[in-house]
Image (cartoon, rainbow, N blue to C red):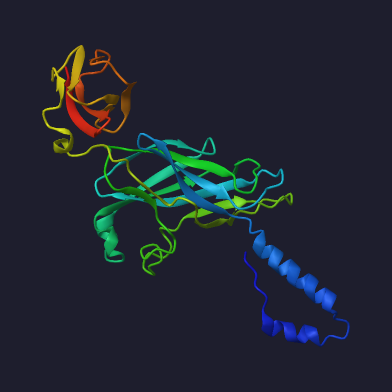
C-alpha cells in the first residue's frame, strides 16, 4: 500500500506540547519508507523463441529468506483473432489452471481495438504453494505456453487500466491478480499483491517470411514435393543459413544450421509441414507434403 502524508492532518500535531521537529522528521521518514518498499509484483512477458512465451512475476521487494505462498493468480492475454494457444507448464507445481476464451468482437463495444483480437483469461488455483524466497527484481515464471500456427501481430498482456478491463460493465472480471501471503508473521493471509504490467507487456511475433519476389521466385526451390525420404533445396545466388520445419500447429520438428542441399525427412510423420528457409538475403516459407 502506498501511503502519502496528509498535510491537513499534520496541523494538530504541530501544536502538541511535546511534539518536536525530530519526531516529525522521523514520522515522515517512516511514511515514505512504506512507499519505497512496496511489497508486490508486476507481470511481464518473456519470449522463449519458436512461439513459446512465459508470463512471469517481477518481484518489487526482497522476501529476506521468507518463502511467500500463493493462493491463486490470473491474467488476460490478447492475441490476433483466430489464434489458439497450448498451455505447456503452470507453476508452482501442482497448480490447477483454467483458460477462458473471450471473443474480441464480443467485447469490442467496450473497446473497439478488440474487434480483430481474441482474449484468453487464464486463472489458477495454487493451493497455497510456495513460490520460493527471492530478491528484489527476481523474475518468477508462472505460465509457459505455445502460440499455435505462427500468426503475425503480437501477444500482449491486458492492463487493468485498459479501456476494456476498466469498463464498469466488466466489473473487474478481466483484471490481473496475484493473491500471495508475503508477511513472515506465522499466519496465512492472502492479499492481492499484483501491481501493474512490468518491463515487457507485449511482444511482436517473429517475421518469418518476406515476399518471394524480393529474393527471386526462381532462385530458391524445394523438391521433390510431396517427399518421402529426402528433400533437396536449391538456392542460386543465395546462401542458405538455417532450415526449420514446423508442424501446422507451430511446433518445430527439425532445425538445421548451414545445411547441405539434401535433407533427410524420413523421420517425419506423413503430414503437411512449413519449411522456413533463412538465407543471407531474407527468409521464405515453403509448404512441404510428407508422404
Q: Is residue 260 above or below residue 146?
A: above
Q: Residue furthest right?
A: 18
How many numbered tags mark residues here?
0
Q: Quadrant of the N terminus?
A: bottom right
Q: Residue furthest front?
A: 237
Location of residue 166 in the rendering, given as x and y in whole percent from the top left corner:
41, 66
Location of residue 11 in the rendering, given as x and y in whole percent from the top left corner:
74, 86
Compare residues 198 and 69 and report the one nearer the observer: 198
Q: Quadrant of residue 284?
A: top left
Residue 284 makes an appearance in the image = yes
Location of residue 141 in the rendering, given as x and y in whole percent from the top left corner:
51, 41
Q: Is 60 left, or right, of 249 in this rendering?
A: right
Question: Which residue corresponds to the image point at 79% horizontal and 85% vertical from the top-left?
Answer: 14
Q: Is 277 left, or right, of 96 in this rendering?
A: left
Location of residue 175 in the rendering, given as x and y in whole percent from the top left corner:
44, 58
Q: Residue furthest left?
A: 218
Amino acid at each position: 500500500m502506498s501511503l502519502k502524508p496528509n498535510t491537513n492532518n499534520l496541523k494538530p500535531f504541530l501544536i502538541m506540547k511535546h511534539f518536536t521537529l525530530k519526531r516529525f522528521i522521523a514520522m515522515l521518514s517512516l511514511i515514505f519508507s512504506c512507499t519505497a518498499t512496496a511489497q508486490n509484483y508486476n507481470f511481464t512477458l518473456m519470449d522463449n523463441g519458436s512461439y513459446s512465451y512465459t508470463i512471469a512475476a517481477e518481484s518489487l521487494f526482497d522476501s529476506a529468506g521468507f518463502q511467500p505462498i500463493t493462493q491463486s493468480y490470473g491474467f488476460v492475454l490478447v492475441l490476433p483473432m483466430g489464434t489458439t494457444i497450448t498451455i505447456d507448464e503452470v507453476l508452482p507445481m501442482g497448480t490447477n489452471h483454467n483458460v477462458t476464451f473471450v471473443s474480441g468482437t464480443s467485447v469490442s463495444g467496450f473497446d473497439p481495438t478488440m474487434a480483430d483480437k481474441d482474449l484468453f483469461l487464464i486463472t489458477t488455483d495454487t493451493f497455497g504453494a510456495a513460490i520460493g524466497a527471492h530478491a528484489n527484481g527476481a523474475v518468477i515464471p508462472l505460465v509457459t505456453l505455445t502460440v499455435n500456427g505462427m500468426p503475425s501481430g503480437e501477444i500482449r498482456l491486458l492492463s487493468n487500466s485498459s479501456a476494456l478491463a476498466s469498463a464498469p460493465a466488466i466489473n473487474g472480471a478481466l483484471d490481473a491478480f496475484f493473491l500471495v501471503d508475503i508477511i513472515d508473521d506465522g499466519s496465512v493471509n492472502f492479499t492481492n499483491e499484483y501491481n501493474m504490467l512490468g518491463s515487457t507487456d507485449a511482444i511482436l511475433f517473429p517475421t518469418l517470411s518476406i515476399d518471394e519476389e524480393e529474393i527471386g521466385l526462381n532462385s530458391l526451390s524445394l523438391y521433390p514435393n510431396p517427399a518421402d525420404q529426402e528433400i533437396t533445396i536449391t538456392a542460386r545466388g543465395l546462401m542458405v543459413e538455417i532450415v526449420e520445419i514446423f508442424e501446422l500447429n507451430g511446433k518445430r520438428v527439425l532445425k538445421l544450421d548451414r545445411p547441405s542441399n539434401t535433407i533427410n525427412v524420413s523421420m517425419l510423420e506423413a503430414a503437411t509441414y512449413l519449411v522456413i528457409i533463412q538465407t543471407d538475403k531474407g527468409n521464405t516459407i515453403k509448404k512441404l507434403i510428407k508422404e
